[in-house]
Image (cartoon, rainbow, N blue to C red):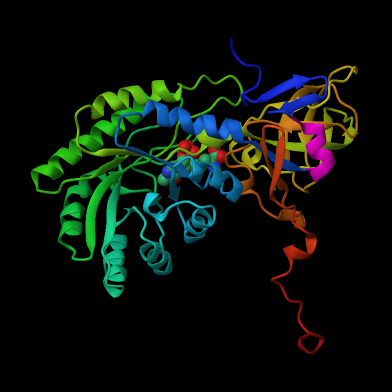
Amino acid sequence: MKQEFPLPTLTRSARGLLIEQVALGDVAARFGTPVYVYSRAALTDAFNTYQHALEGRQALVCCSVKANSNLGVLSVFAQLGAGFDIVSGGELARVLAAGGRAECVVFSGVGKSRAEMRQALEVGIRCFNVESASELERLNEVAAGMGKTAPVALRVNPNVDPKTHPYISTGLRSNKFGVAFGDALALYQRAAALPHLRVCGIDCHIGSQLLDPAPMVEAACRLLDLADRLAGEGIHLEHIDLGGGLGIRYRDEVPPTVGAYLAPLLELFEGRPEALFFEPGRSLTGNAGLLLTRIEYLKPGEEKNFAIVDAAMNDLIRPSLYDGWHAVVEVAARDVPKRTADVVGPICESGDFLARGRDLAVEEGDLLALLSAGAYGMSMSSNYNSRPRAAEVLVDGQAVHLVRTRETVESLYALEYPLLSSQL
Ligand code: LLP
């Protein structure tokens, strides 16, 4: 039976919507709105499905920190033995602060600074996913300055079409990511010759919200082919990192299960010596979280109706940026007629919508839950319009843990200075 909500631990009850055993109405009363709410059970299950599918293999599941970088969420994964995929020194600091182990961290990204390289070398991360010839030289130089050897993989651009939104496809020749497939062999030879680098792997990430495993299998075949050619040159890899990308159900998408997604890949790797790394983000956290918001006003319009809520595009930018679709669910059942409305925020932009044309049985003051918001929700939030960022809570059975306090307005300008009267 298809479950009602994409968030598996969300259910209806006489107390309204429950996440695990906690009523969302109680969360709003206690912490205010807007508030991101995550389910520990859903996070744990999502991670464990990867672990189970990879049982008996030499594998490392590196949670992609960019999807959800809250310390509470990261600490759940760290405790489950996860690795982490990071893209900045800031994300590395978060992983360590959440109890993650540096030796399970892979560092991707096209623009690593010298300071970030030093920080990562200092703590001893597992691997740098290097994305250009210049980065290779810089990393060697930085490692030399510290008397260290940097573990490297090249992020190779396999030039496959992931068939997803153009903003989130990354493995095409036209994208800025990775090194060209045709240049990889020569770059590996260069890396092997540099004294402060140790070649340990190969990496790719072709895009996000993939609903078909075929492009991933195609990319993996290209990587294996290259790994075999490298072995012929005496360069033996310890691991192959296939990145993240597995999609989730937002609306009516039918993504492959983790098992079905990994099965053809595991078949390809049968009998191979390399360990297998993955960097899932959305498929670990996306459907483990929601954004809870309250309706400030119902505004009937000439052409359409608006439900104006206290969350906005600064809290969840996916609808405005990618036409992302998030289910909107009434927290309390109400005996009022359904009205079709756009769910919009208080920000001064027409692009400030969270959902459009939804049938809602609501009154002013009611709570709405925007589902599938656990990935690229809070982590992409901003302070646009000087809006303090939302609080975040992590539900665990009957317990609710505050994992980020709502920002105060003062904190928004705490780093700013008006000019002194003598300067004006
Ligand atoms: N590894 C690398 C190198 C990545 O660039 C990404 C995501 C991931 C792993 C995780 O991918 P996932 O498993 O989450 O698909 N903000 C967009 C998604 C951007 C994805 C960027 N890279 C969205 O909200 O749809």
Residue 373 occupies quadrant: top right
Q: Is residue 176 above or below residue 254?
A: below
Q: Is residue 283 above or below residue 130?
A: above
The span shown in magenta is: 22-33
Residue 58 is at least partly visible in this image? yes
Query: Which residue sits furthest bottom?
Result: 422
Q: Quadrant of the C terminus?
A: bottom right
Q: Is residue 163 above or below residue 344?
A: above
Residue 216 is a magenta residue: no
Residue 70 is at least partly visible in this image? no
- At a point 35% along the width and 28% down the height, the residue shown is 55
- At a point 77% along the width and 32% down the height, the residue shown is 24
Residue 28 is a magenta residue: yes
Residue 286 occupies quadrant: top right
Q: Nearer the viewer, residue 420 or 174?
A: 420
Image location (x, y in percent) of residue 103:
37, 53
- At a point 75% along the width and 55% down the height, the residue shown is 388
> Is residue 282 left or right of 289 when viewed as pictured?
left
Query: Which residue sits furthest top?
Result: 1
Q: Quadrant of the N terminus?
A: top right
Name the main secondary structure of what is drawn in magenta. Answer: helix
Image location (x, y in percent) of residue 190:
17, 58
Q: Nearer the viewer, residue 27 or 256?
A: 27
Image location (x, y in percent) of residue 144:
26, 71
